[in-house]
Amino acid sequence: MLTIGHCTLEARIVDITTLDVDAIVNAANTSLLGGGGVDGAIHRAAGPDLLRECETLGGCVTGDAKITGGHRLKARHVVHAVGPVWHGGERSEAELLAACYRRSLELTRDAKAKSVAFPAISCGVYRFPADEAVRIAIQTVIDTLPHTPAVEHVIFACFDEAMHARYQSEFERRLQAPPSKPA
Ligand code: AR6
């Protein structure tokens, strides 16, 4: 766990669809019309009205996000973020992944949501190297928090112990190192 100003960041091994938070983030694709992985799980748990709402959104470009209601989820909102497919790192994948986290937090703020949970965007079928993705996720959240002062709780929802350990070790590293300047 890490506390940054008024906000707590924590990593949990949990199915993100079960969380009772104001917003959960989906690792979506540009169609916003569902898929496998966490996207499929969120659509199954939220029910068919989520897809109906997504159909009105006109898709979303990589690095951006759009917000819907949570429908049958406990979460009040779903932020559908489109992460980059990993192609080796030469196609702005890091910047696009950072943009996903930034945009998702901005939409969370605009929805007046105080708590938000992220999956490890792009770390599944999109094959983004997980260690780098975790560093980008935490750094971007920390850099964005000054612009989203109402956000009080950020959960990184991990599907397995290996992913959880990455967040924990990045939190530890930051607790031991002097704070870095905002990007
Ligand atoms: N709760 C938390 N984390 C989960 C869950 C869950 N219920 N299910 C999977 N994960 P992925 P991507 C983890 O592949 O790489 C879809 O088809 C998973 O272990 O879901 O961004 C979309 O439609 C991994 O660490 O997302 C897109 O086409 C992380 O979530 C494409 O996949 C992300 O894995 C997006 O690929």
Image: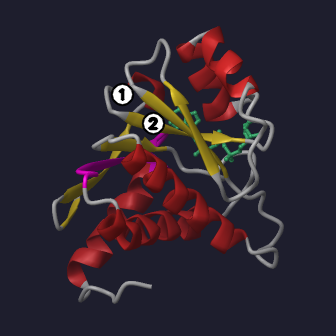
Circle count: 2
Residue 117 appears left or right of 95: left
Q: Where is 27 relative to 78, above or below?
A: below
Q: What kind of element bears circle 1?
A: loop
For the residue pair 28 and 110, the one nearer the viewer reads as 110
For the residue pair 143 and 67, the one nearer the viewer reads as 67
Res. 109 mark: none
Q: Which amino acid does label 2 sit on?
A: Ile
Given contact means CB atoms under 8 Å apart, are the residues at marks 1 and 2 in contact? Answer: yes
| Mark 1 surroundings within 10 Å by alpha-carbon count, few (fewer than 14), some (14 through 19), many (20 or more) | some
Rendered-image quadrant of the N terminus: bottom left
Rendered-image quadrant of the C terminus: bottom left
Q: What residue type is labelled 1?
A: Leu
Q: How far is mark 1 from mark 2, CA to CA?
A: 8 Å
Q: What kind of element bears circle 2?
A: strand
The residue wearing badge 2 is: 24
| Ligand 1 located in image quadrant | top right
Q: Where is residue 19 in the image (x, y as percent from the top left)?
A: 36, 28
Instruction: Give the residues in magenta.
Output: 150-163
Residue 65 appears left or right of 5: right
Q: Position of residue 89 (x, y in %)?
A: 76, 75
- Give the mark nearer the N terminus: 1 vs 2: 1
